[in-house]
Amino acid sequence: MVGVTAKKAERLMNLTICLLVTRNFIPKDRIRQAVGGYRDLTDDAFDRMFDRDKDELRVLGVPIELGSVVKAFEDEVGYRIRRDRFELPEISLEADEAAVVGLAARVWQHASLASATSQGLRKLRAGGVEVDESALTILEPQLATDEPAFDPVFDAVTQQRPIEFPYRGSGAADASVRHLEPWGIVSWHGHWYVVGHDRDRDAARMFRVSRISGTVSTIGESGSYATPADLDLRALASTLGPPHPHSSATVRVRRGAGDALRRRAVRSRSIDEQWTEIEIPYGSGSSMADELVSLGPDVIAVAPAEVRDAVIRRLSAVAGKATA
């Protein structure tokens, strides 16, 4: 996980596993015994750390639910992660890519279940909690982001601190300064987005982190606004985010470049020693053109015409500014 220490990342991962493998709601005392890092804390320290950890997982889009441990009695509450709301949609990979990901997943699973996690699962079983280890199959290794704005945005979300940043929207030639009360960060169609209350428009908005073109600055104190209690990041992203891919673009990518494009490709064929032609699903031709232009001479837009022409317009505008 980005922006946290290794020890904290392990605790958050094990908390996620603990809540994911249980079929029913699990009370806090069982969680405290099962998750490494909680057991030796005082009651107050555990409560504070557990609350912070839940908030951070929710920031990352992990859907933690609260409910009654025993249906007939509502006085004892517990927590869980519903598998159907957490798992990712089906992802298509080339044969060689699938082999690499499969190997990485097996190595990750062996390492993750070798010590603290396996001990936690044993403690859950010993406490009478029904454990479904098959749920672990939906926990996959994730590539860390190298976008410079991610860490300061993530920190602002966890601290509930308003921020301002220069942002270049899709098709915009220049960046404009935006002011946001960030509620959470979500991965949507292969990109990271920050979701929150846009003070300039007085409405909920979603911004692609890679389009933040400069320094992210805080403009308020920690806890100076409240995140909506019923916030569902993925549902909101489906409303505010770019449209779901409905068309495909044919693009030629230079060898050794365009890894993000290659990962989303549904088809790929070698042209020669320098170029690979790939087919990429997209929802917005304008957004697709922006991404291709950002890769400069390492990509060539072949089809359709709406994407190719949009790339040409953007490159022509840049060339015009350079010669002015």
Image: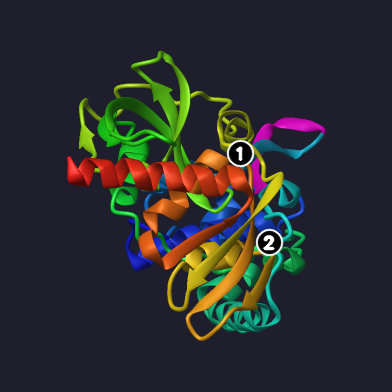
Sequence-wise first label, 1 or 2: 2
Q: Which residue is mark 2?
A: 127
Q: Over which residues does the magenta segment extend? A: 72-81
Magenta: main secondary structure: strand
> Which amino acid type is shown beneath numbered disc 2?
Gly
Query: Residue at left 56%, top 50%?
Result: 29
Residue 316 located left or right of residue 125: left
In magenta segment, residue 75: yes
**Res. 56 visible in picture:** no
Give the SS element for disc 1.
helix
Q: Is residue 82 above or below residue 176?
A: below
> Which amino acid type is shown beneath numbered disc 1?
Arg
Q: Which image quadrant is residue 313 in? A: top left
Q: Position of residue 185 (x, y in %)?
A: 46, 42
Q: CA distance from mark 1 to mark 2?
A: 33 Å
Give the SS element for disc 2.
loop
Q: Position of residue 57 (x, y in %)?
A: 49, 48
Q: Which residue is mark 1?
A: 234
